[in-house]
Image (spheres, rainbow, N blue to C red):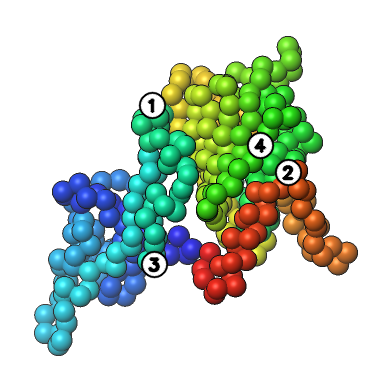
């Protein structure tokens, strides 16, 4: 998270905890595996050992060290909470998660997510600034007809709408059956009455269809690089899962291509700034306002 190594773990009592993955002795990572089970957390460097609550339990060959307070040298905790299958972590003082996510929890009840099960993760490297990728997602469907012909075939663009509130926005569109012989792959896996594309500041997306729930997290890598992590949750058969992921991969590649093109254009001496479409880009404007507010107040994004 913002370059900080993090552990998320359930302790022996089932309590969910988030801890900085930094040994208090010489700053090596305590956990190096991306996932798994453990009864303790042992640093591979000098063997310092912590329990699953982050308390320091073992310090080999450390007897005789003056003024050493073991209780003050546990792994440093972070604020942690959950919404549905997702774990949210915050490194500083944070508002309650439901307040930060509002109105997402009210519009998408957790009980409705229970039918979805995690299936796969895909990661994409993109040669653009992370904000370029966010702008692309939030443009109110402005680019769908020109960049995503397959997706455009199942969305009713005339009824595509964007709503903004707090730290979020949501784009909604009725779904339609594609014309016979055209975009059949999209019609098979993008089903239901209406799709919802949620964004939570600064860089989290959640897309809802009848049989699929897809999350995306955009992570800055450099001034002109970012990484997009997509997780797929499904409620239907294995074959439909594979088809849905293939469709999502096609959409991601189309987005990556145009975002990398935009990044090249931003480096041009002829470009300063563009105007907003009142009809479509309210979500982009909302994002820029939230971003500017935090930068103006000297806050981390």
In terms of secondary structure, where does tag 3 sit? Answer: loop
At horizontal 29% and vertical 64% (from top left) the residue drawn is: 77
Cβ atoms under marks 1 and 2 closer than 8 Å: no
Residue 122 position, x and y percent, is 53, 40
For marks 1 and 2, give the one nearer the viewer.
2
Quadrant in which residue 116 is drawn: top left
Q: Name the residue under label 3.
A: 92
Quadrant in which residue 119 is drawn: top left
Residue 218 position, x and y percent, is 56, 51
The image shows residue 162, relative to residue 26, as above or below, that is: above
- Separation of disc 1 and disc 3 at Cα? 33 Å
Q: Can residue 190 be seen in this view?
A: yes
Label located before the other in sequence (1 or 2): 1
Q: Mark 4 points at which residue?
A: 161
Label located before the other in sequence (1 or 4): 1
- Separation of disc 1 and disc 4 at Cα? 27 Å
Q: Name the residue under label 2.
A: 280
Q: Mark 1 points at which residue?
A: 115
Mark 1 crowdedness (10 Å alpha carbons): few <14, some 14-19, many ≥20 = some
Mark 3 crowdedness (10 Å alpha carbons): few <14, some 14-19, many ≥20 = few
């Amino acid at each position: 998270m913002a370059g900080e190594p993090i552990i998320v773990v359930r302790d022996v009592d089932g309590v969910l905890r988030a801890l900085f993955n930094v040994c208090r002795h010489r700053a090596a990572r305590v956990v190096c595996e991306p996932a798994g089970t453990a009864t303790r957390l042992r640093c591979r460097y000098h063997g310092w050992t912590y329990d699953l609550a982050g308390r320091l339990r073992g310090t080999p060959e450390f007897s005789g060290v003056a003024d050493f307070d073991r209780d003050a040298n546990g792994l440093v905790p972070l604020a942690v909470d959950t919404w549905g299958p997702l774990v949210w972590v915050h490194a500083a003082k944070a508002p309650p998660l439901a307040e930060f996510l509002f109105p997402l929890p009210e519009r998408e009840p957790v009980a409705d997510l229970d039918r979805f099960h995690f299936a796969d993760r895909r990661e994409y490297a993109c040669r653009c600034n992370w904000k370029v990728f966010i702008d692309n997602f939030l443009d109110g469907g402005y680019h769908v007809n020109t960049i995503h012909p397959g997706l455009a075939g199942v969305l009713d663009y005339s009824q595509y709408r964007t709503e903004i509130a707090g730290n979020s926005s949501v784009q909604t569109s009725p779904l339609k059956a594609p014309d016979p012989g055209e975009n059949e792959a999209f019609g098979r896996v993008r089903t239901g009455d209406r799709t919802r594309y949620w964004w939570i500041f600064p860089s989290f997306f959640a897309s809802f269809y009848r049989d699929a729930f897809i999350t995306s997290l955009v992570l800055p890598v450099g001034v002109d690089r970012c990484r997009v992590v997509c997780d797929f949750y499904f409620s239907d058969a294995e074959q439909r899962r594979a088809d849905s992921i293939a469709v999502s991969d096609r959409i991601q590649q189309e987005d990556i291509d145009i975002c990398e093109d935009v990044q090249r254009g931003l480096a041009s001496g002829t470009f300063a700034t563009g105007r907003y479409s009142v009809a479509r880009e309210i979500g982009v404007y909302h994002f820029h306002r939230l971003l500017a507010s935090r930068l103006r107040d000297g806050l981390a994004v």
